[in-house]
Amino acid sequence: MSAKDRSKEGSMKAITANRLRDGEVVFLGEGGRWVESFAEAALFPRAEADAVLAPAKEKAEREQFAVDIYTFEVVEQDGVPVPATMRERIRTAGPTVRLDLGKQAA
Amino acid sequence: MNHIAPGARAGIYHYDEIDRQFVAERVEQFRKQVDRRLSGELTEEEFKPIRLMNGLYLQLHAYMLRIAVPYGVMSATQLRKLSAIGRKYDRGYGHFTTRQNLQYNWIKLEDTPAILHELAEVDMHALQTSGNCVRNVTTDPFVGAAKDEVVDGRVYAEILRQWTTMHPEFTYLPRKFKIAISGAESDRAAVRIHDVGLLARRNEKGEPGFSFYVGGGLGRSPFVGKLVREWVAQEDFVAYLEAILRVYNQYGRRDNIYKARIKILVHELGLEKFTQEVEEEFARLRGPKYRLDPEIVEGIRKHFAPPPFEELPDHSESLERARAADPAFANWLAVNVAEHKAPGYAIATVSLKPAGGIPGDATCDQMDLVADLAERHSFGELRVTHVQNLVLAHVKKDELYDLWKQLDAAGLGSANAGLIGDIIACPGLDYCALANARSIPLAQAISARFADPLRQRTIGELGIKISGCINACGHHHVGAIGILGVDKKGTEYYQITVGGDPTLTTAIGDILGPAVTETEAVDAIEAIVDVYLANRSDESERFIDTLKRVGHAPFKERIYAAD
């Protein structure tokens, strides 16, 4: 289920990290696959997110894939799931002062 | 290393073979450490302190690499290398910081050893730009050029670089340790907000010596450095500093990161007890081993020999013609150009603060241009200021107009040094993992609001400094107007302080009232300026002097009247 579909079910969380080799912001997608775009991030009900986080974190660290792995709150705005905090919105898109940089530039 | 050519170059410290071998070995050591991390031999917990010791942080979007610019002085060749690295490994720009360093924001871990290798080719590195060690020593950006200079701070900053690099006692201090040196009558290095601030002076015999201020710092608990000793002779320079660091190492709070800086130790022990401890340690250390040999000092001083200045009249006819013909240039001349000790020369501040721009950012094209201009007009050398600007320190007055036209064409000709548009701003939440709020958009909005150069000059000296969190990298505590970004239930708010002062009359600003939103903050700054202009006794009374005279009340009334 995509981020857009799942966020409508209530308060949701996503899982994020920075990729070890280059620092790129990544999100845990469907099937335990890490993706670069928030639109492809899997969303989890708040109560389930921590249970998903623990094995994903263990695997990503064991495989030297990602660091700083944690969950963050997602809310729905105009029918679209968006990170609840400015910090995560900036990580998801890029610097608000350089729209030519980061994921928003792609 | 080919940037130290004899002849028409300003003196820059050039590494000897020991320095070069050491830096090269560190690069190779880090290359292997990165390999071991990527292969899984090292965990992140094991690797993190290692990468930090090499200036590599993990920020919001990528790794950030902080490059040391020792005491803020570098050659044109070194700046070109920074530009080349920015193009090849980053996104075509760099960010000059309040520590006179340069940061890249989009670095890949796997590229870092190659970057450090390229830096080493021009005697540069990222050592001591992070970690609980003695950080890059900062000094006056007008060093070696200022008319009011008494002692050349570069010499002693370089001595400290050599003394502290890999010093086993100072590699694992309770917390980071920042030293600033000023050797001029005006303090352009903000010495009293550093862990140790040094004022270099001369006694009646003309001998150099130092006043030691200890325990200054901003962050969560701001303190102004306290005078621990009025006069330390040159020969005791290293011994006295070592005594301070030993006392800190022994008593500094390693159990609580918020209380680990030396400012807390000085505060908790009290100045008298702290000074007594330092003096006792100094008495134990003092002796031949720790005596700074005058020959060593002179050997280092030779590296910073003055460039071959021409004998010129101090008055420049061509400069006066240009001043009369071009009002924009005349304004820049009045604001961004300072007196030089050599007749016929001047010190030019290159503003990295265009109206609406990002304070401290320079594109690689701009870096290349400044490097070219440094070659052409300033003996191949330039400086980074703690206010996030660049300085060409030795420009012939006859060449200032040509210089300014080239700077202006590249967006580097803003006439705002020391004025309201010359805003310090940390990277804030747009880049920094520690930030609570964005700093840069507010700086952009304020500088755009006050874009008119003549309005800025009418307002006069007024430093705005913005930090996106309490760590205070944007020096907000010592801004005439300081702004601290805070997060209130997911919304960015900005707390305004007034009356801060980073110069020798150092003062921590006072909070004016409740925090305001970003939009309100820009209006509030304008209201503060309006109140100042309406209340100042005459045009020569600076903002902070009017504030001292009239107090906070009229400013509070204007901003919070509707509350």
Image (spheres, rainbow, N blue to C red):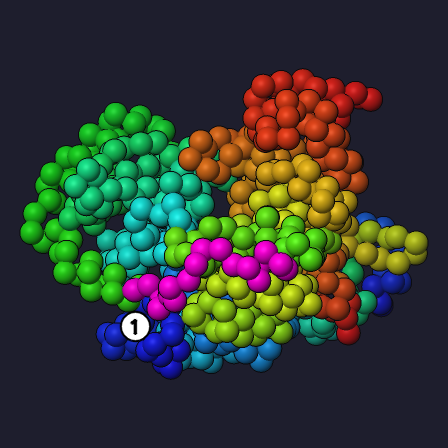
Q: Position of residue B146 (x, y in %)?
A: 41, 51
**Furthest-left residue in this view:** B288
**Amino acid of disc 1:** Tyr
Q: Position of residue B480 (x, y in %)?
A: 58, 34
Q: Position of residue B41 (x, y in %)?
A: 42, 75
User: From the viewer's perspective, is B120 left or right of B354?
Assistant: left
Residue A50 appears in the rendering: no
Magenta residues span: B305-322
Dividing the picture into quadrants, the one containing residue B265 is: top left
| Residue B271 appears in the rendering | yes
Q: Quadrant of the N terminus of chain B?
A: bottom left
Say which chain tag 1 marks: B
Residue at 17 percent of width and 34 percent of height: B279
- Judge whether residue A47 is colored magenta: no
Which quadrant of the rendered structure holds the C terminus of chain B?
A: top right
Whether B319 is drawn above or below B261: the answer is below
Residue plotted at (26% across, 58% down)? B159
Name the quadrant containing residue B26: bottom left
Say which of B270 and B34 sits in front. B270
In this rendering, would B450 be left or right of A60?
Answer: right
Q: Which residue is mark 1?
A: B15
Q: Give left or right: position of B485 versus B56.
A: right
Q: Is residue B296 above or below residue B554?
A: below
Q: Nearer the viewer, residue B486 or B393?
A: B393
Q: Look at the numbered disc 1 and give the secondary structure of its residue.
A: loop
Chief SS of the magenta region: loop
Question: Could you say which quadrant of the image residue B124 lies in?
Answer: bottom left
Give the answer, above or below, for where B334 lies relative to A102: above
For image coordinates 50% across by 50% down, the residue present is B338
Looking at the image, which is closer to me, B285 or B416?
B416
